[in-house]
Image: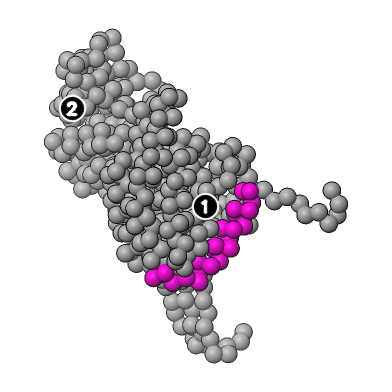
Amino acid sequence: MSPSTPLAVSPVREAAVAAGVAAARLATTTGAQRNSALRAIAQALTDRSPEILAANKRDMDDARVAGRPQAVLDRLGLSDGQLACLTDMTRDVAAMADPVGTVTSGSVLPNGLEVRQIRVPLGVVGMIYEGRPNVTVDAAVLCLKSGNAALLRGSSAARHTNAALIAVMRDAVADTAVPADAIQAVPGTTHAAVRELMSLRGLVDVLIPRGGRELIEATVRDAAVPVIETGVGNCHVYVDENSDVERALRILVNAKTQRPSVCNAAETLLVHEAVAPLFLPRALDELARHGVTVHGDARVLVLAAASGVPSATGVPSATGAPVVAATEEDWDREYLAPDLAVAVVDSLDAAVEHIRRHGTGHTEAIVTESQSAARRFILALDTAVVAVNASTRFADGGQLGLGTELGISTQKLHARGPMGVTALTTTKYVLVGDGQIR
């Protein structure tokens, strides 16, 4: 190679450079201009839904041929109704208040200098995610609303759906003030492309991994780019001795069965020993009717046998699944499936200790009529979301008025809990004077 021959630039780096240019352009757009682009995306998702759904069918067919488990198929599928929800979500986000330029604090110093702290975009946001093609739209929409460029790397299982969604969104913004390169797929289909994305410190401002434990841990461990760590969801429901049994049943069934394959579904049930004889037989029956396999500790197995629920040595009933003996690994498992680890505990403190040992800092719920027990539970647990007398399934940006979310952050710096548009901003100080010098 001669000295004048330029070095080849990889496609991943090219995409990151283009995203940086787009982010700089976005920084000068108005909220109204970005909202106009979002409304154009919403309309395009509706107008071009047949091609999006056809692409998703290709991915679903490939996944079935490959023998992917049901939990993967559930996350991968995109129906007419789900696509309509994405369209509504995009319009809802467009209607939300603009976070960019919001003054978070302000004062006037004794020398007359005005000091304001305002919200500004992060810049280039890289998303690495598994399974769900809806994340492609969630990420692009939240990034555009908050003035950021999005570099998107979905899983190979959803490659046709993600490609179609990104093409639709890029085409939709072509006639708006938003540059198309603000929405890009990370080029390449290999892990090498992901590793290169992780290395682009200075070109990518932040990485957000969303998926299973292995993906998140690998990103946190290997990335040179700053990472916002989203959480694996080993979520617990604790039924206190002072609980309403009917309320506890409704919450438990919803938390476990409403959609088992998501990170805010309950994976472990803890029941106070004082209420266990009354609550557990009914709970086991309800779980069996919903086809949930219970992985129970010794006391749960005794109550299951007494209530007639099929045991580990029995045959699943026609209406449900058996109760099996829990292993030590079950307490740490994110099933993402119709399975639930269940234990009887001696006290609220024992429940808290169990959660501290096995929880992932995502979402924990208590069912109790005691305000003091609820307060102790809230204060004792270091977790992103705590629910009192409510399902863990409410740990969701869309449910909490954020429009949607990029994930649930379980770290403690910058963002924690469901991450909406505000979590995709940082701040800068603006000093306005009339000639003050130090």
Q: In the image, 304: left or right of 24? A: left
Q: In the image, 58: left or right of 386? A: right
- Specify whether residue 151 is in view: yes
List x then y, in percent, for residue 249.
18, 34
Q: Amino acid at mark 2?
A: Glu
Along the line of sight, which residue is nearer the eye, 433 or 1? Answer: 1
User: Residue sitting at 42 percent across and 69 percent down?
Assistant: 33
Which mark is in front, 2 or 1?
1
Q: Is residue 328 magenta?
A: no
Where is mark 2, residue-wise?
A: 286
User: Residue sitting at 32 percent across and 17 percent down?
Assistant: 325
List x then y, in percent, for residue 115.
49, 79
Which class describes the residues within 10 Å of circle 2: few (<14), some (14-19), or many (20+)? some
- Is label 1 in a helix, a strand or a loop? strand
Look at the image and give the residue range highlighted in magenta. 11-33
Residue that extends furthest to the top in the rendered view of this protein: 313
List x then y, in percent, for residue 68.
42, 26
User: Residue sitting at 63 percent across and 48 percent down?
Assistant: 11
Along the line of sight, which residue is nearer the eye, 125 or 21? Answer: 21
- Specify whether residue 409 is in view: no
Residue that extends furthest to the bottom in the rendered view of this protein: 434
List x then y, in percent, for residue 263.
37, 39
**Up-down relation of residue 171 to residue 233 (above or below):** below
Q: In the image, 388: left or right of 52? A: left
Contact (Cβ within 8 Å) of mark 2 with mark 1: no
User: Residue sitting at 48 percent across and 82 percent down?
Assistant: 114
Q: Amino acid at mark 1?
A: Gln
Along the line of sight, which residue is nearer the eye, 318 or 214? Answer: 318
Look at the image and tell me in which quarter the C terminus lies: bottom right
Where is mark 1, residue-wise?
A: 184
